[in-house]
Amino acid sequence: MAEITHEELEERMLDILEDICEDDEVRARRDEDLFALGLLDSMGAIELLVTIEEEFGVSIAPTEVERDEMNTVNLIVHQVEIRL
Amino acid sequence: MAGENELLAVVERWALDRPDAPAYRSGDGATMTYGELWKLSDAIAATLAERTGGREPVVVLGHKSALMAAGFLGCLKSGHAFVPVDVEMPASRLADIIGQLGEPLLLAAEGVPEALRALAPDGRAIDLRALVGADRPEPACPPDRSRWVAGEETQYVIFTSGSTGRPKGIEVSADNVARFAEWVRSFPVVADGGCVFLDQPPYSFDLSEYEVAGALATGGCLYAVPREVAEDARALFADLRASQVEVWVSTPSFADLCLADKAFDQDLLPDVRLFLFCGEALHHGTAAALAQRFPRARIANTYGPTESTVAVTYGEIGAAELADPAPLPVGRPRPGTEIRIVDRETGEPCAAGRTGEIVIVGDTVAKGYFRNPEKTAAAFFETRLSDGRAVRAYRTGDAGHVDAAGVLHCEGRFDTLVKVNGFRIELEDIEENIGALPSVKQAAVVPVVRRGRVSHLKACVVLERRARDEFEVRQAIKRGLAERVPSYMVPRTVKLLDELPLTCNGKVDRKALAEA
């Protein structure tokens, strides 16, 4: 896969999250807990992991990360970034 | 048959023959043997008998614990139907159920949340934990077995989503459960007896009757996985690894959640020999992944609404079914059940192979809706099986057809009932409850389909007047709704609209909303 910049990754992730959460509020609240905001639930989280694998070829097992390591937009971007 | 409850009779036999065999186990090390389960349910029955001589239903409130199972048996022994209610049920919803039941006694298997406490004033609420502690009272004599719930009496009442915005009770008889359990005992693997069953769905969801009736009727053991474990992937996998589960019972959605982790395979659960699914459509992707990761296990798809006691068809999914791209079949009816496919409008039988409404005829069709003769008459009727036996029949509202081999295929709903993660939800139920929130003028709820299945619900809401902070209003709607309905009924997304789009017939255009 071609190199992707942090900004590009962030932008694509926002698109993905906007689609999964069906809410553009994700753009404004990048450090807020998406579960606490009610924008993600356990099934939504699985959908996110599947989409991340499809889009970036990055596989993250649900048992690999604690929920509080991957519950905000910025943390999700970070988790993908360190695996690229 | 009067005077005999087959479930109690079989548990009694295990308690006498193998008192030390485990009946209930969970990851935190708690176990309860058949002997203990029997004794505790005696104590519960005695306590109930001291409070009332009647035979009215009793609410059993809690989540996953051996006390719940003992509570169910204790109710049956003292002549009461049990009404399983999960402790997550919002207070207003439980208040509605309690109101419908009259002034029921309530057995609590765990601390009753503050919000629920007012609903069962002292004297009506019995803390089951007090019956197992070191300072428990000397047990009184349990009621005589002539008191047992039996025959056509109601074994349990399960409350489910109702289209009026209020929960609707479904009354299942002792004989219904006995006939259902007799069938489950004949399943492969289960028939071997003494199996460990995954016990994950809440008891308020009748899918759990699969493992409760299946395990207890065969001397097996329930392996309880509480919600807080199931929702934390790491904790769940550690728990499953130690479970020795042999019969897996869940919704397909729960299996999907597990399959998302590649570690979910035969190494994690080397003892699993049967996957039993019910509650919603089983998709190819789920079954194919399971077949690949658990080559030693059988995968069974089953179908049935609560109104016909958990499930009435069984079909294994093998290579042939997986090779066919058509939606997976749900199998053939159990002995004692006949499936009729009828025209939804006229009620006339459809030609062989044609799609129509699925009508379930047989000896596990429930008694009807609790204290609701109107709704009962609209969905249930008396008829005969082809051998002449008089039984009840239930119009499911599900669409389907029976193929030339006699296998049933489900094809969705005729109405607005949806399944989300296996939970049955009347969209109108949510709409009514959103409509009752302050500042809401109108609401419509639609299922959002992703990857060919219902992924979540979306609420489209029109406010009385425009909101200043839209995000806050949407959050407030979710919070307000969570106080009125169980969390699985709260839509993941709330959209604010100026008006709801209408079809040319003047009805809310649900299709347009789903795509909006």
Image (cartoon, rainbow, N blue to C red):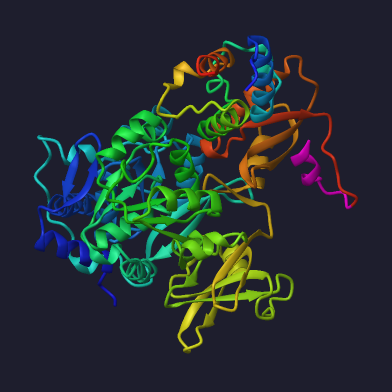
- Residue B505 visible in this rendered orientation of the protein: yes
Residue at point 19% right, 38% down?
B30
Residue at point 35% right, 40% down?
B63
Q: Is residue B247 left or right of residue A51?
A: left
> Toward the viewer: B65 or B55?
B65
Q: Position of residue B170 (x, y in %)?
A: 48, 59
Q: Is residue B368 left or right of residue B118?
A: right
**Residue A28 counted in the magenta span:** no
- Residue B303 visible in this rendered orientation of the protein: no
Q: Is residue B447 left or right of residue B31?
A: right
Outermost residue to the bottom: B388
> Toward the viewer: A5 or B468?
A5
> Toward the viewer: B211 or B402?
B402
In the rendered structure, which segment of residues is drawn in magenta? B505-516
Q: Is residue B78 above or below residue B400?
A: above
Q: Position of residue B499 (x, y in %)?
A: 84, 34
Name the quarter where the C terminus of chain B is drawn.
top right
Q: Position of residue B409 (x, y in %)?
A: 59, 66
